[in-house]
Image (cartoon, coloured by chain):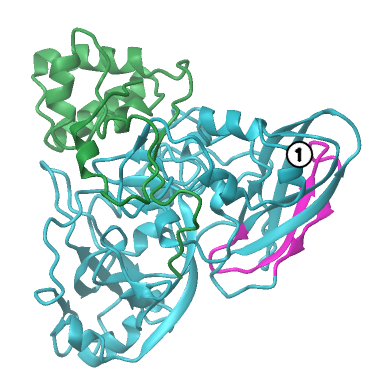
Chain colours: A cyan, B green
Amino acid sequence: MSTTTKSRREFLKQMSRAALLAGAAPSMLAWALPQGQSVPFPGEDDMLLRSFRFVDLESPVEYFDTWLTPVPHFFVRNHMYEPSELDANDWRLSLGGEVEKPLTLKLTELEKFETHSVVNTLECAGNGRSLHRPQVPGIQWGKGAVGTARFAGPRLRDILQRAGIKPTGKHVMFRGLDEVPGKVPPFIRSIPIEKALDPDTLIATHMNGSPLTKHHGFPGRALVPGWVGAASCKWLTEIKVLDSEFVGNFMNPGYRLPNQPVKPGDTVKPEDTHPVTGLSVKSVIAGPSDGANLKAGKVTVHGAAWAGEADIVRVEISADRGATWSRAKLAHDQSHYAWRLWSYDWKIGKAGEYTIQSRATDSQGHTQPATPVWNPSGYLYNAVDQVKIYVS
Amino acid sequence: MLYHISALALLMPASGLVAQKSVPAKVTADLPAGPMQAKATTACLECHEARVILQQRLSKPVWTKEVDKMTKWGAVVDPADRDALIDYLSTNFSPDKPAYEPQTTAVEKKGSAPKNY
């Protein structure tokens, strides 16, 4: 179940008991990892390289020890090439379609709208895809295509209301400046008008207090909180109000789930599917790392848990393969749409091999399933998380 | 795996803060050797790099769908090569192959926490 590299695992196995028991930040351990075989990538620190072209970078789960994920450790998901040229002065955002007064805004005009900030856990719909069996095509994310940041910018609602939405306006389409290779369909998607008008849906220009970096959608991106990352279009340049859901590859057949459970090999008709929207309840163990060697004593099991548009109410830990569960302590920092960090002080009595599991429950009563819900594109993997550790 | 000295090492920041001890990995990877390596490189790597393929573990029917989808999306595959390309991919990247181990991006400032919040 590991998503870490062999060298990382081997290194962690060698870490001293003192370091682990002293609660040394797992990220400190990660920074001390041997640096062989790494790829220079300015601004993106110690990330798992899923693809260089297009850029797809995953956070090692050991970095999920801060409520806000530092930008250099925040996952990057691109479907296409990033825009080759981005100039804040030349950038324009147009708004048209089913509106009374179409608009075109410069960045300086966008910045005159009231700014709102939302701490949001952003997760790729395909996070955890590599854990499905049988495996399905797509970027083979482990557990780290997720992160939490404070996004800020004007509300999409304010901009839509400036243009005046016609009664026929039911969906809002986003188009970014991604550069499309070959005959690949452009990455264009839409969200329902209700979500577009939610006061927490933004045109984000800032992330953790700084202007967006290029990898995260400079100078402006949609931020659709609680929903899969694909809804939050980067390098936004066009917003169009539509009378129905956008028709295109990345709305259908892309980013859809079967209405009913399916088995590998089943044929799923498009009419028997629905778009992926909100994230599922999920927890991830950030430490101890999968494969760690520990000595008997106290160890702090810790990680993060999130639930899209719902709130986390409970995280439980099991060290006996789910026979018994104990409640973890939820950390103080919280915000709607943001993950909760959690920890559990576990006393290891005797030597042996242990599987530690984490299981989150949300405010809507959903609990992570014991086994993954397989689907043809590997979306929304949220099975109970687990790491294996060795105690001597 | 395909680690060797890359000219792109020159792109690394010249700052003395960079503590890069060993040889950087190649920035983009290569497809495995085989009779279809050259044609697969031309067909697939025009749009994306090899790691996108190297990390897949798929059955032949799933590879067949992927090749046909990518051909529709602009991958140049001679119809006479289609079956051989599917064989090449489904032989090299089948579910029974060992798990793919990704490389990492470099640590820019060793021992200091990169913060941006």
Quarter holding the N terminus of chain B is: top left
For the point 91% across and 37% down, the residue is A349
| Viewer can see residue B1 | yes
| Residue A311 among magenta residues | yes
Asked if residue A318 lies left or right of residue A15, the reply is right
Residue A26: image location, x then y, percent: 62, 49
Viewer-side residue, A100 vs A200:
A200
| Quadrant of the rendered image containing residue A198 | bottom left
| Quadrant of the rendered image containing residue A246 | bottom left
| Residue A166 among magenta residues | no
Q: What amino acid is at disc 1?
A: Arg
Q: Which residue is mark 1?
A: A17
Asked if residue A192 lies left or right of residue A322, the reply is left
Q: Chain of mark 1?
A: A
Please determine whether, in this image, residue A339 is positioned above or below residue A171.
above
Residue A1: image location, x then y, percent: 59, 33
| Viewer can see residue A291 | no
For the point 13% across and 14% down, the residue is B81
Q: Which residues are magenta?
A: A305-331
Q: Residue furthest front?
A: B16
At numbered mark 1, what does the secondary structure look like: helix, strand or loop? helix
Viewer-side residue, A307 vs A292:
A292
